Image (tube, helix red, strand yellow):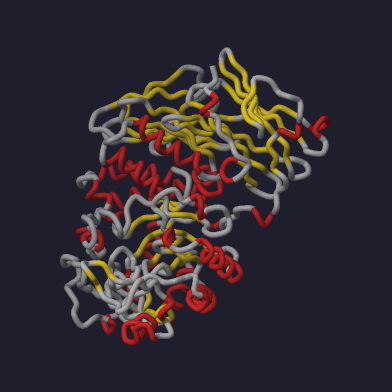
């Protein structure tokens, strides 16, 4: 019997959306393993009798509780009437806009409707992001290229980081290391904040129109961006628009003049005077930090100021995108205005929001192009790091994430395994570099855009902030060259095979109580199968090669198509990657 309570579909968001001007994607949810197959009955609203047709849906993904079915259609007139027919072994039910029934009522007006594919409604992130390999740089800790910019109080490069110390990293240092990044395979850089600020992390901005003098000047940034572009590298800056720093002039004026300040409504003041009472400021801040007062982005003057910041750095320097700090704490209407400004200046600029949870409200085409994919990060940590889920549990977590979003969202999701806000991945893995190779392999063969946190590729470790913000390792004798070569290889594979950037994703094996996962990236032209053994014991895996001839990317060994299942042994912390 079909469990009717589990059936879900709505004609919007990730359940019914336009992929492009000609294609409509439809999804429906059913209880896991409850339905044997699902059909979509679709046609034109104004010519139903002539155009109605059954279309078998494909199982897109599954999570712990549900199956998600999908169909893509290209209706002649860019509109669609549709409903669903669900099959179990001894049961058939229909699902229309009027609910679930055992028989179809032959009343087409009760169908779901996709009225029209409007170009302005399409979620269309920049195409170049699909091909991007990002590298996150914390400028103060990456490379010191100009000693004349050094802070007065500076620690020796490589000393223990604290919340307040400085090491002299600057933008000139990045310019000098661009060939290193090109050699690695990087074609996009994400910089944490570079604007004037008293801190080493720069998330407490004092002036949004000035590069911090310890990093360089606007001219330095122009040179950096120009040289990056000449080498095929895009540049994304960090925008801190949720809050300013304590030294931001408007906030200084409120501190000095209180209720009489003309900037009093630039911030969320609960009561005057501005002070900290029992550890809580009398004004809203980021977290409870008195150094980071929260902007009132509903104020037209604040909105105009911040939108001008977004406009200025694209127009003046030619940056390629903005990463938006604490994006979920800023009102949606501001981000809608932000998108219009940014896209009017540079239509293919990448807008990335920092959202740690379900980011769907920001990913409907009117605000962000992508969000930092922490749901994927947490799934990776749960399986490879924390060992709190087995292979099936990992597949369920990834499946749930796949079911949440439109295809376009997954194609440009910002996939990280660590960052300046987390422990470094090598530390999380207890120093196990073999396991790090597996984690990074999944990151680079999954849907979305991978990002390397600076130094991971040469074995840089570190605990929570500030330890995760250590100085980059530049001494060759202290770098892990084998790990670097591994990153070069997986980057090369991703660039060589478009199916790893644009193809569909599905798990082929993810059993309970198993440390082995096997999944496939595929399209109509190619298939790549990846098997990963995350344990310290040898594990066998059964592989079906009935449809294509495959070659092992690591060894070159050929595997011809066969109807027999092949059992292969995976050594501890090893992987297999086959390409058709």
Q: What is the residue that sits farthest to the top in this orientation? A: 90
Residue drawn at (58%, 58%) of the image: 366
Give the camera-side residue of 282 and 576: 282
Residue drawn at (56%, 14%) of the image: 89
Judge whether 341 appears above or below 74 on screen: below
Give the camera-side residue of 373 and 560: 373
Q: Residue 61's x, y, as percent?
A: 50, 33
Residue 578 in sight in this render: yes
Residue 551 in sight in this render: no
Judge whether 307 appears above or below 335 on screen: below
Where residue 288 sits, quadrant-wise, is: bottom left
Q: Residue 359's x, y, as percent?
A: 46, 51
Where residue 155 sits, quadrant-wise, is: bottom left
Q: Residue 239's x, y, as percent?
A: 43, 69
Judge whether 93 appears above or below 505 on screen: above
Judge whether 366 appears above or below 253 on screen: above
Q: Residue 45's x, y, as percent?
A: 78, 38
């Amino acid at each position: 019997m079909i469990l009717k309570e589990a059936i879900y579909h709505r004609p919007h968001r990730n359940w019914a959306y336009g992929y492009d001007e000609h294609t409509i994607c439809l999804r429906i949810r059913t209880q896991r393993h409850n339905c044997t197959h699902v059909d979509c009955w679709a046609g034109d609203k104004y010519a139903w009798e002539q155009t109605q047709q059954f279309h078998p849906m494909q199982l897109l993904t599954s999570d712990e509780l549900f199956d998600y079915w999908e169909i893509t259609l290209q209706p002649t007139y860019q509109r669609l009437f549709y409903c669903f027919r669900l099959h179990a072994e001894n049961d058939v039910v229909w699902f229309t806009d009027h609910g679930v029934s055992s028989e179809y009522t032959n009343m087409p007006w009760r169908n779901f409707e996709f009225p029209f594919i409007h170009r302005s409604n399409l979620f269309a992130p920049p195409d170049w992001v699909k091909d991007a390999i990002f590298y996150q740089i914390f400028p103060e800790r990456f490379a010191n290229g100009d000693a004349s910019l050094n802070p007065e109080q500076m620690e020796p490069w490589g000393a223990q980081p604290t919340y307040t110390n400085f090491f002299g990293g600057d933008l000139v240092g990045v310019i000098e290391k661009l060939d290193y990044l090109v050699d690695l395979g990087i074609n996009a850089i994400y910089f944490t904040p570079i604007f004037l600020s008293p801190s080493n992390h720069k998330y407490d901005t004092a002036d949004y129109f000035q590069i911090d003098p310890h990093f360089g000047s606007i001219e330095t940034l122009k040179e950096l961006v120009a040289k990056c572009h000449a080498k095929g590298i895009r540049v994304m800056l960090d925008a801190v628009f949720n809050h300013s720093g304590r030294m931001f002039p408007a906030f200084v004026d409120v501190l000095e003049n209180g209720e009489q300040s003309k900037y009093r409504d630039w911030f969320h003041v609960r009561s005057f005077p501005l002070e900290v009472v029992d550890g809580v400021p009398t004004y809203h801040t980021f977290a409870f930090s008195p150094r980071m007062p929260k902007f009132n982005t509903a104020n037209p003057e604040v909105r105009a100021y911040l939108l001008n910041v977004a406009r200025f750095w694209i127009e003046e320097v030619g940056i390629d995108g903005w990463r938006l700090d604490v994006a979920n704490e800023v009102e949606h209407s501001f981000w809608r205005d932000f998108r219009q400004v940014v896209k009017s200046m540079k239509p293919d600029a990448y807008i990335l929001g920092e959202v740690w949870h379900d980011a769907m409200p920001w990913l409907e085409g009117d605000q962000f192009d992508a969000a930092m994919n922490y749901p994927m990060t947490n799934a990776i940590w749960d399986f490879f790091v924390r060992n709190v889920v087995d292979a099936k549990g990992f597949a369920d977590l990834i499946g749930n994430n796949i079911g949440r979003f439109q295809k376009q969202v997954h194609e440009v999701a910002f996939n990280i395994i660590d960052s300046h806000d987390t422990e470094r991945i090598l530390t999380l893995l207890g120093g196990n570099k073999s396991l790090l190779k597996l984690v990074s392999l999944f990151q680079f063969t999954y849907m979305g855009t991978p990002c390397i946190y600076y130094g991971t590729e040469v074995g840089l470790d570190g605990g929570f902030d500030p330890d995760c913000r250590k100085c980059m390792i530049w001494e060759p004798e202290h770098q892990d060259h084998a790990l670097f070569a591994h990153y070069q290889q997986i980057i090369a594979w991703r660039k060589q095979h478009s199916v790893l950037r644009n193809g569909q994703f599905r798990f082929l094996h993810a059993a309970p109580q198993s440390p082995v996962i096997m999944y496939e990236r595929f399209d109509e032209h190619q298939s790549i199968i990846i098997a990963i053994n995350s344990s310290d014991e040898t594990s066998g895996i059964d592989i079906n090669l009935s449809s294509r001839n495959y070659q092992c990317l690591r060894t070159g060994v050929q595997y011809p198509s066969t109807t027999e299942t092949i059992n292969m042994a995976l050594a501890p912390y090893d992987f297999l990657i086959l390409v058709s």
